[in-house]
Image (spheres, rainbow, N blue to C red):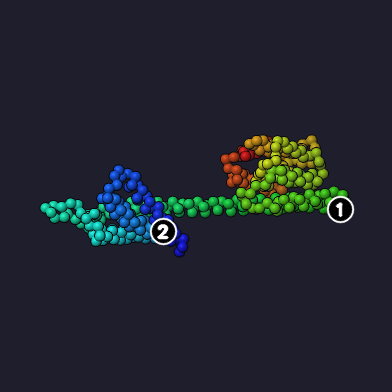
């Protein structure tokens, strides 16, 4: 109720400022008779026009947008227009007959505008007022719909990010636990380091909120990527099978979390990751206005884990949602090699 009252008086103030302001600006001489005309036509009757405007914005137009019933809209508009004409004629005839209805005198007899004549003129005025009301309602309805679409988009982004984390967590966690289990069976001293690295990885993954606007430090993302590669090296038992190169100035930059690791995970999953002669090459260069990230791997003869995994489809969708118009993703694939290059403009 309080919000409706506030809205009413705010709109009324804007309406009256426009009514008076436009006429005061275009009037050359503000004589007493001119001021009386402005006060009556644009003050009193401007207020009556505002009541017509406000009534339309509160009843038939919102009801139409909610239910899409044309008969209800037309009947409401006609009712408001008819009541507005009758009430304005009553005010004019009762209080301002000479100002509003007198068209002059014929043989000393005043010529007064009839109701039908006044109704035609007022109908045009009311039509413009109702058109303004429709534009007002449609504009704010569009704003609400746009805000709702933005909320849905954000929820969609958050759901996709949560789904990405879940899929990556499952696939990666199973491989890592199997590797740690194998080390534990032979009582390797690497179990402690492997467990600590896995703990750091999971803490980082869990700590990333499912909010699309959130950005993590690029240095933290690179550290996470290094831990991920360390676990993959542990799983394959081949340190030289993965080559990571980081160049440029990475401090002070931020990036959407967990965005780079799917490309690396894809290389381990579908490529050769246990042959030093065909290493997985990962490069990251951070320039003043551009981040360039590339992954190159030799393809395995038969792809592993044909079902499951995150793939790159979700990554493309995240890039479209988060870095729309500011990224380039190029993928080159042959029978022997697979190459991804991602460029993000800061």
Judge from the rendering whether residue 185 lies leftward or rightward of residue 54; answer left or right: right
Q: Nearer the viewer, residue 35 or 70?
A: 35
Q: Residues within 10 Å of mark 1 (few under 14, many from 20)?
A: few
Q: Is residue 249 above or below residue 196?
A: above
Residue 196 pos. (x, y %): 80, 51
Residue 339 visible within the image = no
Judge from the rendering whether residue 326 lies leftward or rightward of residue 18; answer left or right: right
Q: Residues within 10 Å of mark 2 (few under 14, many from 20)?
A: some
Q: Is residue 4 above or below residue 304?
A: below
SS under mark 2: helix
* Residue position for label 1: 185
Q: Residue at x 41, y 58 (%)?
A: 9
Residue 107 pos. (x, y %): 11, 53
Choose mark 2 or mark 1, whichever is in front. 2
Furthest-bottom residue in view? 1
SS under mark 1: helix
* Residue position for label 2: 8
Furthest-left residue in view? 107
- Asked whether disc 2 touches disc 1, contact meaning CB atoms under 8 Å apart, the reply is no
- Look at the image and tell me in which quarter the N terminus lies: bottom left
- Look at the image and tell me in which quarter the C terminus lies: top right
Disc on res. 293: none
**Location of residue 252 by image quarter:** top right
Residue 277 visible within the image = yes
Furthest-front residue in view? 32
Judge from the rendering whether residue 132 lies leftward or rightward of residue 143; answer left or right: left
Q: Residue at x 73, y 46 (%)?
A: 224
Pointer 2 or 1: first along the chain: 2
Q: Nearer the viewer, residue 23 or 344?
A: 23
């Amino acid at each position: 109720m309080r919000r409706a009252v506030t809205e009413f008086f705010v709109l009324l103030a804007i309406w009256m400022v426009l009514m008076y302001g436009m006429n005061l600006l275009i009037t050359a001489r503000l004589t007493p008779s001119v001021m009386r005309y402005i006060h009556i036509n644009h003050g009193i009757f401007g207020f009556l026009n505002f009541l017509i405007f406000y009534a339309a914005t509160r009843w038939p137009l919102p009801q139409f947008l909610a239910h899409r019933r044309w008969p209800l809209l037309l009947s409401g508009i006609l009712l408001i227009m008819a009541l507005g004409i009758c009430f304005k004629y009553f005010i004019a005839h009762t209080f301002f007959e000479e100002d509003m209805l007198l068209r002059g005198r014929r043989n000393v007899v005043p010529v007064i505008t009839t109701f039908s004549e006044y109704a035609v003129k007022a109908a045009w005025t009311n039509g413009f007022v109702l058109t303004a009301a429709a534009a007002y309602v449609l504009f704010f309805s569009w704003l609400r719909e746009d805000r709702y679409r933005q909320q849905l988009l954000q929820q969609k982004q958050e759901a996709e990010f949560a789904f990405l984390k879940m899929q990556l967590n499952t696939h990666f966690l199973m491989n890592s636990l199997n590797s740690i289990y194998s080390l534990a069976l032979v009582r390797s001293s690497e179990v402690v380091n492997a467990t600590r690295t896995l703990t750091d990885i999971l803490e980082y993954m869990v700590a990333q909120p499912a909010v699309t606007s959130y950005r993590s430090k690029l240095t933290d993302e690179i550290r996470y990527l290094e831990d991920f590669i360390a676990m993959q090296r542990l799983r394959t038992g081949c340190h030289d099978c993965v080559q990571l190169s980081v160049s440029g100035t990475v401090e002070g930059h931020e990036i959407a979390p967990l965005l780079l690791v799917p490309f690396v995970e894809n290389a381990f999953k579908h490529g050769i990751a246990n042959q030093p002669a065909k290493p997985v090459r990962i490069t990251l260069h951070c320039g003043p206005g551009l981040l360039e990230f590339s992954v190159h791997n030799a393809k395995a003869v038969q792809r592993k884990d044909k079902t499951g995994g995150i793939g790159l489809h979700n990554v493309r969708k995240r890039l479209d949602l988060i870095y729309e118009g500011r990224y380039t993703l190029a993928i080159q694939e042959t029978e022997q090699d697979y190459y991804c290059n991602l460029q993000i403009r800061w």
